[in-house]
Image: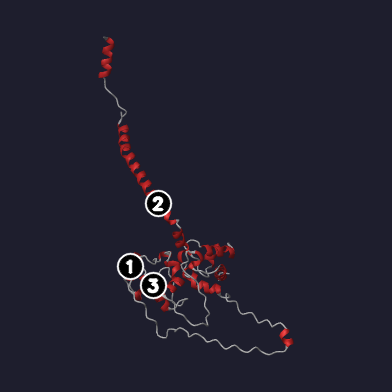
């Protein structure tokens, strides 16, 4: 009887759970809310990461890679004595505007971004053209550069209309150059008669004509580099700024040329041009020459 009585007393006694103090109760409440929240957060992160990975797989396709590395501009060196040719809006854009308005460097609105261009287009063509010619923000003035004012106007209309605008094509100014008439070939001259002895002598070597690329460095700078290196857009060292060029000169001409060819920071490869390695090197050498 005594054993049974002891068992009944133990059974009837108070029961103690794992939570015995107010501090333990507080931690239990915290963990009861914290663990589900952490679990939900990890689940959302996992799902979001999976979606990004799926979207990124297309970025490595041949079409996407080709689209990213395709040139966005070209350099065209012309004979100054040749007939003047007015560029189309697209051609002018590729020559002078693509370096910033394709990548969005220094806050330039990208072509095709209707949201970024909407407020600008609403200001009207004259305001857009004035900003381009006089310069605005990090964009240097385009007047007096490689493009005529009319070509700049065409480039403005091209960018605006490819970004949701419906601007009219600007009229050509009075006295605009007309296409040159094709030149007629001169009739072949009869072969000169000369003594046999004279014919046997080697022809005198004509003086070598000036190399076509003698001023290629400066010409390429004006067409592809000035847009950023004149105003220091996106950290580009300004032309003639010794302090800005000083830390870069240690790379030497070869190192700086390699950076320009491959692209660095906000600068696209080859300055968004199709210039050759030799032309890029000449442009870099020209810019270095202004700080020495």
Indicate the position of residue 112 as horizontal and vertical percent values. 37, 66
Q: Secondary structure at mark 3?
A: helix
Left/right of residue 102 with respect to residue 259 in the rendered view: left
Q: Between residues 86 and 63, which one lies in front from this camera angle?
A: 63
Question: Mark 2–mark 3 contact, CB under 8 Å?
Answer: no
Left/right of residue 261 with respect to residue 117 in the rendered view: right
Q: Which residue is mark 1?
A: 118
Q: Earlier in the sequence, mark 1 or mark 2?
A: 2
Q: Report the Cα–Cα distance between label 1 and label 3.
A: 14 Å
Residue 57 visible somewhere in the drawing = yes
Q: Between residues 286 and 175, which one lies in front from this camera angle?
A: 175
Q: Categorize mark 3 by other alpha carbons within 10 Å: few (<14), some (14-19), many (20+).
A: many
Q: Categorize mark 2 by other alpha carbons within 10 Å: few (<14), some (14-19), many (20+).
A: few
**Above or below 38: residue 286:** below
Q: Categorize mark 1 by other alpha carbons within 10 Å: few (<14), some (14-19), many (20+).
A: some
Q: Secondary structure at mark 2?
A: helix
**Above or below 17: residue 257:** below
Q: Which residue is mark 3?
A: 158
Q: Which residue is mark 2?
A: 54
Residue in view at x 26 percent, y 15 percent:
8
**Above or below 123: residue 2:** above
Q: Nearer the viewer, mark 1 or mark 2?
A: 2
């Amino acid at each position: 009887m005594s054993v049974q009585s002891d068992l009944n007393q133990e059974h009837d006694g108070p029961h103690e759970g794992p939570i015995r103090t107010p501090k333990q109760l507080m931690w239990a409440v915290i963990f009861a809310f914290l663990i589900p929240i952490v679990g939900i957060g990890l689940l959302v992160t996992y799902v979001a990461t999976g979606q990004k990975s799926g979207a990124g797989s297309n970025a490595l396709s041949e079409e996407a890679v080709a689209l990213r590395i395709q040139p966005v501009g070209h350099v065209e060196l012309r004979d100054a004595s040749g007939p003047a040719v007015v560029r189309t809006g697209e051609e002018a854009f590729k020559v002078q505007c693509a370096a910033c308005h394709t990548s969005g460097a220094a806050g330039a609105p990208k072509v095709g971004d209707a949201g970024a261009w909407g407020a600008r287009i609403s200001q009207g063509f004259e305001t857009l053209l004035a900003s381009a010619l006089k310069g605005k923000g990090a964009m240097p003035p385009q007047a007096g550069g490689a493009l005529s004012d009319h070509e700049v106007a065409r480039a403005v209309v091209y960018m605006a209309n490819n970004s949701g605008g419906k601007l009219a094509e600007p009229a050509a100014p009075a006295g605009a150059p007309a296409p040159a008439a094709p030149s007629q070939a001169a009739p072949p001259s009869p072969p000169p008669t000369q003594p046999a002895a004279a014919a046997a002598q080697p022809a005198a070597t004509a003086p070598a004509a000036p190399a076509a690329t003698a001023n290629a460095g400066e010409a390429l700078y004006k067409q592809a580099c000035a847009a950023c290196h004149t105003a220091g857009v996106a950290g580009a060292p300004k032309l003639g700024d010794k302090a800005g060029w000083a830390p870069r000169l240690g790379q030497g001409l070869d190192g700086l040329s390699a950076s320009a060819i491959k692209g660095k920071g906000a600068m696209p490869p080859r300055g968004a041009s199709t210039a050759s390695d030799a032309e890029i090197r000449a442009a870099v050498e020209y810019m270095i020459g202004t700080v020495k």
